[in-house]
Amino acid sequence: MNKILMGVLMSALVFASCKKEEVTPDDPTTSSTPVPLVEVSSMTNASNQTVTLYSESSDLTTGYTNFYVTVIDSLGNSVESANVEYAPLMTMTSMSHACPIEQPTFDAALGKYKGALVFIMSSMGGDWTLDVSVDGVAVQFPLVVAESDTRVVGNYTGTDGMTYFVSVLRPTNWVVGMNDWEVLIHKRASMMSFPADNDFTIEMVPEMVSMGHGSPNNISPVSIGNGHYNGDVNFTMTGDWRMHMTLSKVGTEIHSDAYLDIVF
Amino acid sequence: MKQVNLLVTLVLSIGSFYAISQDDSTHIENCVLAEEVIIRGTIRKSNGQSVEKVNDVQLSVDKILGTTCGVSLIKRGNYAQEPTVRGLNAGQINTTIDGMQMFGACTDRMDPISSYVEPNNLNSIGLNLGPNDEQFGSSIGGGFNFKLLKPTMNAEKFISGSIGTGYETNGNAFRGLALIQLSKKKWALQANSIYRKSENYIAGNNREIHFSQFEKWNLGVSGVVQITQNNTLSIDYLQDNGSNIGYPALTMDVSFADAKIASVSHHYKNRDRFFYELETKAYINFIDHAMDDTKRPSELVPMHMDMPGTSQTIGFYSNASFRVAKKHFIKVKLNGYVNDLHAEMTMYPDFGAEMFMLTIPDARRMLVGIDASDKYYFNSKLNIVYGLRCDFSRSSIITLTGRQTLTSIYNGELTKVNFLTNGFAQANYKLAKNTKATIGVAKAARNATLQETYGFYLFNRLDNYDYLGNPEILSENSWNLNLGAEYSGSKMGLSVQLFGYFFTNYIAGTKQIDYSAMTIDASGVKHYVNLDNASIIGTEIKLSCTIQKNLLFTSVNSISYGVDDENIALPLIPPFKSINSLKYNWKKIRFAMSYTTGTKQNHVDFEKYGETSSNEFNVLDASIGRSFDFKTSTLILHLTAENIFDAAYSEHLDFMSINRQGRNFIVNLTYNFN
């Protein structure tokens, strides 16, 4: 009899101890796999090199957009040490302009040149083209850019009379909780020149637009160079978040009501 | 006294209780801080005699607990009221069903465990008033154990059972119930079921309380088989499905609250042996709960939302009892469980994206506890019982989404390991033939609840704040002191209890000034912290008098008083309440009249705890019952008039001071057969 009793007791213990393994279900937000690239187009330039342009989505939208390039010479070899440059142009009926550019550099891990553009308007206003030059020899890719669903880039005229473009670094992978995030600020020096501006102080306040509340423990982005500002934003839930930003330069408020919208 | 069939008897230690009985109890009982409310069935006293009692199984658990000394109910609606003990609530008390740990799934505490059992399921309700040798887990203030009804082997008849129906005019409430037992020499089966439905009830002054409806059905099945003379195996299954439950004091209702509870147990008993009893149970329970705002008028719902939650507990316990000497008993208990809580919220704005968040972000607690108690009868006058309990628990967040969610408020280690020790000692001394005194001291401790540890913007309607959990919260501790004196004479019984709970690391919410509330119209955000100290003191006085043969008067009185470290009134502390009843038996007719009064509670604090004062109340109830005996069956007819004078009143723990039921006429008909 005692054996039976011990058996019952032991099985109860085993039963209890069996449950100690924690189950961590797969979660899409953990995936560190690189974003799959989509070929935009491929062209042969005057140097008989095949220049192929890639993006992270077949649907280009306004805002910060990474572009990748491979250069293959006539022998089929990858050219990895060329001087590759982007020159975007928006041609409108009365005028034309460029947009903020992050010139590409070769990314050995990807085997591609990687750079970025910040589309400041969609193709509704005219035609976007991107000249990709390899050691000064260019090919031109026509691009169709749709308006982003949310405000991921905004232009603000500051108290100093200058126009600034504020955009959010993409791609993004927002989760409920604390998120690392980066915004970029570019100044419009001319219609063809949009240099990065590292001199801002940003004070950021997120707002859940549908409900009017904010979130605690945010860290306003600070400059890390190249026009990038890095900070932490706390999303306590999914939904429509508006990132209110006050932009200042050496103590002078440049713009008090800049904002970007994030939806996830 | 021996010939009277409705009398005060059965004096259990420090907390006495009153039940129908055939005999007078003179021996010293288990000296535990425990009471037992017998619902239906038999309890065996240590002198070997049995006391049988059939309470009115048509009553709700809420009504039974509401008239139990020391218990006050937090009322959010006409359903699932949350029992508190002497001003202690939620994580401070431990609620179990047949020793099975179970945790409500609702983030607004709409589903206390007591809402998932029905008197029809129960043999009795055990009420523990602090750490003692009846406990099933660590707590500050003891708690409840709902003891399920077991089928009886070797009963007189193979088939027995009962059916019943009841109707209440107030709320147009209907119920129907049935119970059947099959009994053979070596096995028995029992099944019981109840269905309840109520529309909105009417408070005093003819005011309808909207969203106070409910509907539920409940099914209990159990079987027991005798393997050998001293060994039995049993299985129990309980399912409770509530639907369309209104909570007038809250901003949302409940579309469904479903619980499934299953267990298998082994019981060994041999009274002649040193190792005389071993009970082992393995169990699982699951609660699926969903809040609902779709029935509310749209102008009162700023935004539609879904708030489902689940709770699953898998566990076991094993209780061993030893008789060291004739008057010396040792109990050793081992228990463990794993509880998983998940609660989420999705809000649907008129414009814009859906909003989703985890409000209990997939929290898990694993706990293993062991306790031992030693009871020793020095002589016929003095006995002592003392014991020690140790709990080891590990709390964690088991999904990545959950862990990410909590980065919003906390960036440290979320997994928490905690070790608790509880100790108690109690002495009963018989001063004279009918008089005894009790002193009890306990060092109590409890884990912070998973809500207090990991809750994420849980709205509390009482103070209108959103609450954040605090993963660094420490265990709450208290020193409990109980002093009791009891006289039980042939014509009169009197029991006076004084109690005090002296806390350290009392868990309460404090305002987070810079945080913005998530809930629309909430006043702000609080998070849980440990207050240095707090205390609750109080007294319970019970009196019973046999005025003349067949006429019994009982009076149950209680009051609690609580302050925190800044001498500010603690919330949810019941003021003075007195329940006085007269019972008279004439042949087979039973008359009863009950007068309940409560004083106003002005010892409240709005600024810190959001609580407002409450008014006094007076309520008069009366009932008449008649049983008709047939050859092998009994028909019991019960007529009750509640709140005869239609008082418009609420008690202090009633959320938003929503008035309770006005005048109500109840007719219950129960047919027992065997």
Image (spheres, grey):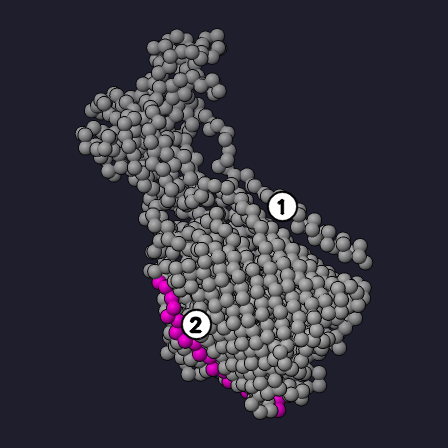
Q: Quadrant of residue A21?
A: top right
Is B313 within the magenta? no
Q: Is residue B470 visible?
A: yes
For mark 2, name the chain.
B
- Along the line of sight, which residue is nearer the eye, B71 or B423? B423
Residue A224: image x %, image y %? Answer: 35, 27
Mark 1 nearby-residue class (10 Å; few <14, some 14–19, many ≥20): few
The kind of residue on which mark 1 rests is: Lys
Q: Residue at x 41, y 15 (%)?
A: A51
Q: Which residues are magenta?
A: B586-606
Residue B487 x %, y %: 59, 81
Whether residue B304 is visible here, answered yes or no, is no
Secondary structure at badge 2 equals loop
Picture layout, residue B404 above or below residue B195: above
Query: For this view, does B263 lie left or right of residue B294?
Result: right
Real-space Cα distance between discs 1 and 2? Answer: 44 Å
Q: Which mark is residue B43?
A: none
Residue at position x 59%, y 75% from top?
Answer: B437
Foreground residue among B445 and B549 = B445
Q: Which residue is mark 2?
A: B575
Which image quadrant for residue B522? bottom left
Camera-nearest label, 1 or 2: 2
| Residue located beneath label 1 in the image | A20
